[in-house]
Amino acid sequence: MQGVEAPQGDAGLSRPVALWRRYGVQGLLVAATLWFYVHSVWPRALHPGFDHNAWEAWALLHGHVFTPPPPARLDMMYYHGHWASFFPPLPAFLLIPLVWLLHGPGHTPVRLVCALVGAACPLLVYQMTRRAGLRAGVGLWLTALFGFGTVFWYAATWGTPWYFVQVLAVFFYLLCLRESFGPNRPALVGAWFGAALLCRNPIALGVPFLLWRERSWNWNRLLALAAPIAAAVAVQLWWNAARTGNPLDTGYAHILMNPYFRASFQEGMFSIRHLPYQLYSMFVAGPGFHSLPNFNGVWPYLALASTGQSLTLTTPAFIYTLEADLRRRGVWLAWVSVLLTALPQLFYYANGTGQFGNRFSLDYTPLLLALLIFGIGERFRWQHALLILVSIGLCGYGAVYAGGIHVLPFH
């Protein structure tokens, strides 16, 4: 597995069979994911509701970065008498054509867009595994794990503003890693990575992994990689300055915050005091059982905290990332990037709410997939398949049922 375009095993086959093996599986993969994702989001897609990014797109259409007073103001930024979204700029820019076409943010089906973008991501995972040299069957298992055995399924089909930016970030991140495992053209790797960080800023900390195939200090290649990333950082700094007057102020400190988090925020947006809770939420937090069997009348009467569940209990198959050999350059660079990307969450004052699983883990889920490729890709066994199925069962429950039935607010 050298991180180059893998042979597809089509030699000696007739052209129709070869084309089926190459494109038929991918077509079925897209169709299946699209059906599951759109079917899951469809009832909510008919009622677009309020979305920060759509309102920001409407403001940009009118030539400024400040929105009209929004109908829902939770987590909207309010600074010196102006309203704005605190999210990075790319999601709003991408929604501009749709907001213009539909004559306003209130009619823009962002949740449906989120599901459609999300449905394309498993295909990118499959292509990444094939470019890494994995067998088609192993690639399908890892693709199934990502598409249906991680909190990405819930994120893509729930489609709130917070999930929309994360789904877009994962989409661009996977395009980046797909290129990295394939031709590895540095300008394209950097461009996709820059797009991802303009959706979710913490992704910028994952940059070390982009060097995993660079064996020498080729300054032309490094410059080609760095230039689009630097341009993306410059856009983010401009975005900050346009709204707050300070390029280093993202605006988050000025949002109308959920009252549930105000006490922890007073201890600092980032503080060592938040570390114990974040470690608990990342590795331990799980569901509880309530004593009333008539709670919504649905078995198994789980009480899922709306602040989420641990990555350990939603995607236990990620334990196999530990099988990757640390002596390999790609492996230790991936782990460095995972740890750096997760670092802000470990000291952050909150873990989100109204969610299934740990949504911040999506910032480094593509890197965990790379570690699985390095770790089990060449020695896939029945126990790997078993834990992938368990992960799919857990996340399927979360995506299909937990969002509307079992989540207890602020439990």
Image (cartoon, helix red, strand yellow):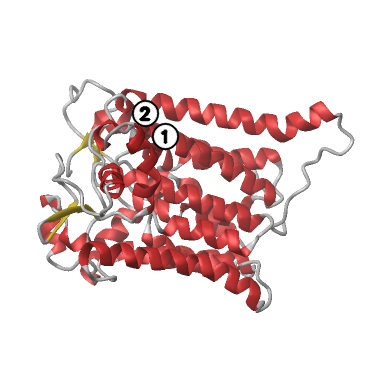
Above or below residue 218? Residue 390 is: above
Above or below residue 177? Residue 229 is: below
- Image quadrant occupied by the N terminus: bottom right
- Dot 1, crowdedness within 10 Å: few (<14), some or many (≥20)? many
Residue 166 location, x and y as percent?
38, 49
State the CA–CA distance, disc 1 to disc 2. 7 Å
First of labels 1, 2 by sequence position: 2
Residue ID at (68%, 77%): 216
Q: Amino acid at mark 1?
A: Ala
The quarter holding residue 315 reads top left
Residue sitting nearer the eye, 59 or 282: 59
- Which of the labelled discs sits on residue 41, or is there none? 2
Q: Which structural element holds mark 1?
A: helix
Residue ID at (40%, 35%): 113
Q: Are marks 1 and 2 in contact (CB under 8 Å)?
A: yes
- In the picture of the structure, the residue carrying the numbered disc 1 is 115
Residue 22 location, x and y as percent?
73, 35
